[in-house]
Amino acid sequence: LRAPFDAAEEAKTLYGHAIPSTIDSEELVEIDTFGADRRKSVSHRRLAEILQARVEEVLEMIYMDVRRAGYDEMLAAGLVLSGGSANLPGMDTLAEQVLRMPARVGVPRGLYGLSDILANPAYATSVGLLHWALHEKQPNGHRRRRADKAHASPWGWLRNIGRWFRFLLPQ
């Protein structure tokens, strides 16, 4: 497409789809490009074809890493897609086709407060790690009791994050 990175990212976000066959072949989209014209009409389906090729490459690399680690036979329930690219429409369908296993988009659940912002695959890994750190392990490595009073307090979770960070930082 010969487009700046920001323009390509915007095109992916606004017009992207992982399954080109679902896009009308006559539909055009405008994107910023390099050169004298600065804007160019491109086929929406062509954009989806480019995205499909890149997504397939990434999925194949993921599968090779899973296989190399010896976990390929342990994924009976399939793969959970997280990260900003999991927002790409059709990503889960393409993942199932390429990997030949179930796939779904992971979205953080059970959030309070900023849940409308954080309920997005782009934050799934970060939120999941924080959830694990707060609810499963205390800084001393012992398992947390579910009836912990710090968890019930509105500020308890913030105190727990502080303790967790102090645990990670060198003294």
Image (spheres, rainbow, N blue to C red):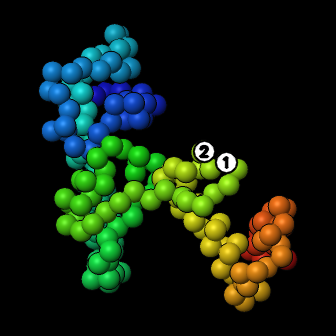
Who is closer to the viewer here, 31 or 131?
131
Discs 1, 2 touching: Cβ within 8 Å: yes
Secondary structure of the residue carrying tag 2 is helix
Q: Is residue 67 left or right of residue 130?
A: left
Q: Which residue is mark 2?
A: 117
On the image, the x and y values in percent for residue 168 come to 74, 74
Give x and y (percent) for residue 157: 78, 66
Q: Which mark is residue 20?
A: none
Q: Identify the residue shown where x is 36% and y is 44%.
A: 88
Position of residue 54 in the picture relative to residue 171 (left or right): left
Q: Secondary structure at mark 1?
A: loop
* Marker disc for residue 114: 1
Q: Residue, x 60% and y 45% (percent of image)?
A: 116
Left or right relative to 157: residue 26? left
Q: Is residue 35 visible?
A: no
Residue 148 found in image quarter: bottom right
Q: Nearer the viewer, residue 17 or 115?
A: 115
Specify whether residue 3 is in view.
Answer: yes
16 vs 36, nearest the viewer: 16
Answer few, some or many: residues within 10 Å of disc 1's Cα (few below 14, many 20 plus, some between 14 and 19): few
Is residue 141 shown above or below 55?
Answer: below
Q: Quick check: 51 above or below 139?
A: above
Amino acid marked by disc 1: Leu
